[in-house]
Image: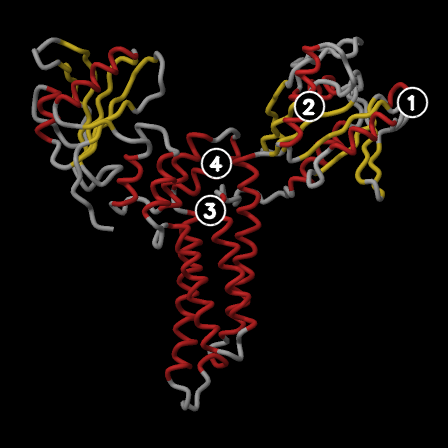
């Protein structure tokens, strides 16, 4: 995309709080005079220069390094200045205020990255991966974000787009020259090639679903009657004593949340107050919050004391669980009956027999949670997809499959392939409405 004239923007690029250094970033057209004013001398391109940063009356604000990146060889494609000073919040605010005095305005969230996108330095998938890298909660998610940032996902998308363009050309050539002796589609093996594109889309969509799990994780809620071992199970999964465990029923009064990783997948586990009738007002509030957590859950792990088995109270809990939520029933404390851990499945669903306290069979639950999530190993090629990527890939796949079904109506086939190409192009931003861009970049942090 061609560069667009724009006013200078400025923001603090480092995280809030105190640190060894802090960075103020400025982007805009023709910033060399601004850099000279801030640094006290003419800047050198891509050279770190020592500078004393002064206010409008000549008073010293701070001293540090000034870096100047002339367009187009910068992150945004415009002139970029970075001021590296001491990382105190007051100093950073004073330095930012000086930049605003000199004609810059405060940057909006994600505006630096948006300018990089608009100036053709990044496509939209790469731009989103910048935020993904910052927000990554696991090492696997960070590695996936880096691959997208360097263009791995975008190159796959572009390859799909190129193949769809080639197929459209073949179909439309057949439509334009119906009386020719050569059947373009049969000779070019067009139908086989469409099937290959469909298979590629299915494979990419599968990897993207796995990446979506890396990004968002799975919300798991532990429920059950008091004293069935919910807190012990949370501690065992977390690998440390996060919840207070006693023999007193009703010890857990409020929801306790912990994020763990299994195979790199973040699992957001919530331990909740035991569900029972009570006159204790504080416990009542905790139980009400338990039901709120259940409404938001991806998976409900219902714990039962194996010695008592399923009781009427457990049946009452089960009856109130949301219809669409995945359920796993855990019969805990098998060590007290000298029973071996196991997994069973019947019409009632999945049942796991384990002991959280004795750490027997807890691996069965970890494996079951990964199964529910739909996770399977992909090595290092998982795509850290956003929901809009998944929607676009599903749409493209549906259109390609529709094109195969329309092989005897070439006008329809041509239209389905065109729509498939448009869906694929939405991923990298070639056909993305401005209002969607506003939503995407508004979720970035200021200064990025």
> Mark 2 or mark 1, which is nearer the start of the sequence?
2
Q: Residue at image x 21%, y 50%?
A: 2
The answer to which of 189 and 116 lies nearer the viewer is 116
Determine which quarter of the picture holds residue 438: top left
Front of the two marks 1 and 4: 1
Secondary structure at numbered mark 4: helix
Secondary structure at numbered mark 1: loop
Is 57 left or right of 213, judged from the image as shown? left
User: Whole-percent x and y of residue 146?
Assistant: 43, 38
Q: In which quarter of the image is the C terminus?
A: top left
> Mark 4 or mark 2, which is nearer the start of the sequence?
4
The residue beneath circle 3 is 388
The answer to which of 364 and 179 lies nearer the viewer is 179
Secondary structure at numbered mark 3: helix
Q: Distance between the residues labelled 3 and 1?
A: 50 Å
The residue beneath circle 2 is 237
Q: Residue at image x 43%, y 91%?
A: 181
Front of the two marks 3 and 2: 3
The residue beneath circle 4 is 143
Is 168 left or right of 243, judged from the image as shown? left
User: Whole-percent x and y of residue 417?
Assistant: 45, 67
Question: Relative to 412, does residue 243 appear above or below in the rendering?
Answer: above
The residue beneath circle 1 is 338
Q: Distance between the residues labelled 2 and 4?
A: 24 Å
User: Whole-percent x and y of residue 361?
Assistant: 79, 28
Please report contact status of discs 1 and 2: CB closer than 8 Å, yes or no: no
Q: How far apart are marks 3 and 2 (CA)?
A: 32 Å
Label 2 crowd bin: few (<14), some (14–19), many (20+), radius 10 Å: many
Q: How far apart are marks 3 and 4 (CA)?
A: 21 Å
């Amino acid at each position: 995309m061609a560069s667009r004239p724009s006013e200078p923007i400025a923001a603090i690029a480092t995280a809030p709080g105190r640190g060894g250094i802090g960075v103020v970033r400025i982007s805009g057209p023709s910033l060399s005079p601004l850099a000279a004013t801030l640094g006290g001398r003419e800047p050198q391109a891509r050279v770190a220069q020592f500078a004393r940063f002064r206010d409008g009356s000549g008073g010293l604000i701070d001293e540090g390094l000034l870096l100047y990146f002339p367009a187009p060889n910068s992150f945004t494609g415009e002139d970029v200045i970075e001021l590296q000073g001491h990382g105190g919040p007051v100093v950073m605010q004073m330095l930012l205020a000086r930049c605003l005095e000199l004609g810059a305005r405060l940057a909006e969230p994600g505006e630096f990255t948006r300018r990089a996108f608009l100036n053709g330095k990044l496509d939209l998938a790469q731009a989103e991966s910048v935020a993904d890298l910052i927000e990554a909660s696991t090492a696997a998610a960070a590695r996936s974000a880096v691959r997208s940032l360097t263009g791995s996902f975008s190159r796959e998308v572009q390859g799909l787009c190129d193949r769809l363009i080639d197929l459209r050309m073949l179909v439309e050539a057949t439509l334009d020259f119906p009386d020719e002796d050569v059947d373009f589609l049969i000779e070019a093996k067009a139908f086989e090639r469409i099937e290959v594109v469909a298979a590629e889309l299915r494979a990419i969509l599968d990897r993207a679903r796995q990446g979506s799990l890396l990004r968002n994780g799975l919300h798991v809620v532990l429920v059950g009657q008091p004293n069935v071992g919910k807190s012990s199970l949370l501690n065992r999964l977390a690998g440390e004593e996060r919840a207070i465990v006693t023999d007193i029923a009703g010890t857990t009064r409020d929801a306790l949340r912990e994020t763990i990783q299994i195979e790199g997948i973040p699992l957001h586990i919530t331990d909740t107050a035991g569900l029972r009738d009570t006159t204790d007002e504080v416990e009542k509030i905790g139980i009400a919050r338990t039901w709120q957590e259940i409404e938001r859950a991806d998976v409900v792990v219902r714990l039962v004391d194996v010695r008592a088995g399923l009781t009427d109270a457990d049946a009452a809990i089960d009856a109130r669980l949301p219809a669409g939520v995945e359920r796993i029933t855990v019969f805990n404390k098998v060590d007290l009956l000298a029973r071996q851990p196991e997994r069973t499945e019947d019409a009632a669903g999945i049942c796991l027999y384990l002991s959280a306290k004795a750490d027997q069979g807890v691996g069965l639950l970890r494996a079951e949670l990964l199964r529910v999530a739909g996770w399977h190993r992909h090595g290092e090629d998982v795509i850290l997809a956003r929901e809009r990527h998944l929607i676009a890939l599903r749409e493209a796949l549906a259109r390609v499959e529709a094109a195969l079904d329309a092989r005897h109506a070439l006008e329809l086939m041509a239209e389905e392939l065109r729509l498939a190409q448009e869906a694929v192009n939405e991923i990298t931003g070639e056909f993305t409405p401005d209002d969607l861009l506003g939503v995407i970049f508004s979720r970035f942090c200021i200064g990025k």
